[in-house]
Amino acid sequence: MIRKILIIGMLVLPLFSAFGKNKLKGQGGTWNFEKWEWVPIPPSLAKSLRPLKLKGIDLNIDYWGPAYRRWNKHGVAGHMVEGEEAYKGKSVFVNNPDLENKVTVQMGLHGVFSGILKPGTTYSYKVALKGQGTFILRAWVQGVEPVTGNTTWLGFPDLIKVSLTDTWTVATGTLKIPDFKNKDYQPKEYIGCAILVEPGSAVYFDELNIVPKKSNTSMN
């Protein structure tokens, strides 16, 4: 059976585009999820989400009447939680109880996590997590043929994969795009990622930091 993917963020791709203007590609990033705001629901977004709502799928969006809550002007990405539920200040919650249709939620590939990694570079990461299931950060590695410019997918490696518990824990480690042996296609200069939430999972996350690894790099 082919696993379906529900993409959060591509539904509102223009809302994500502003973020890319202010970040350096290949340098990872820091996301603390503290800034949220209520804004009117655009007609295009309402049209895209309505069929999902009718199917009973958790839209992973906080909405109230004609408005929805988005994170820091960068688009739609999960429910906001705070207080005792949160790790620090405000955190993100993504619920995916859809065991029947086996829909995997994907968020950030063409938005906040677009082009954040560079092949050949090792990164340190830190992320606060709790919930049920597994937290996954997966890379979409595209290759390009130098002469023709043709592209192909080289692979989709999981760079961070952490089993969750009921209490907040901080996961740390290093990640790197694997070397793909392909004589015709070379990985693109910058690689995008996405957070995946699999069927039956309920994932809370916060304080996601991904930075190039250096001898004096601090993740505090």
Image: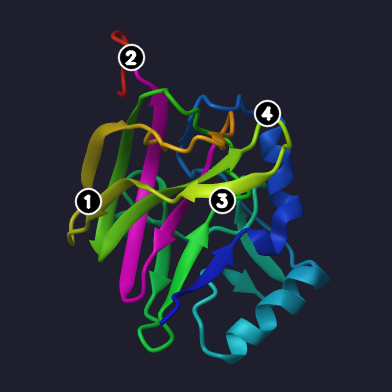
Q: Who's the residue at 40% across and 80% down the image? A: 102
Residue for badge 3: 109
Residues at circles 1 and 4 in contact by the CB criterion of under 8 Å: no
- The earlier-in-sequence mark between 2 and 3 is 3
Q: Which is nearer the N-term, disc 1 or disc 4?
A: 4
Camera-nearest label, 4 or 3:
3
Looking at numbered disc 3 in the image, what kind of residue is underneath it? Leu
Q: Which residues are magenta?
A: 191-213
Disc marking residue 1: none
- Identify the residue at the far top of this view: 216
Task: Give coordinates of residue 100: x percent, y percent.
Answer: 38, 89
Left or right, 211 with reference to 172: right
Left or right of 116 in this view: 214: left
Query: Considering only order in the chain, which callout, 1 or 3, is on the residue closer to the N terminus?
Result: 3
* Disc 4 packing (10 Å; few <14; some 14–19; many ≥20): few
Distance (Cα) linking label 2 and label 3: 26 Å
Secondary structure under tag 1 reads: loop
Residue behind mark 2: 217
Q: Residue at coordinates 41% horizontally, 31% vertically from top-left? A: 210
Instruction: Please say whether residue 203 is one of the residues in the magenta stretch.
Output: yes
Q: Mark 2: which amino acid?
A: Thr
Q: Secondary structure at mark 3?
A: loop
Q: How many numbered marks does the figure carry?
A: 4
Q: Give the CA separation, mark 1 to mark 4.
A: 30 Å
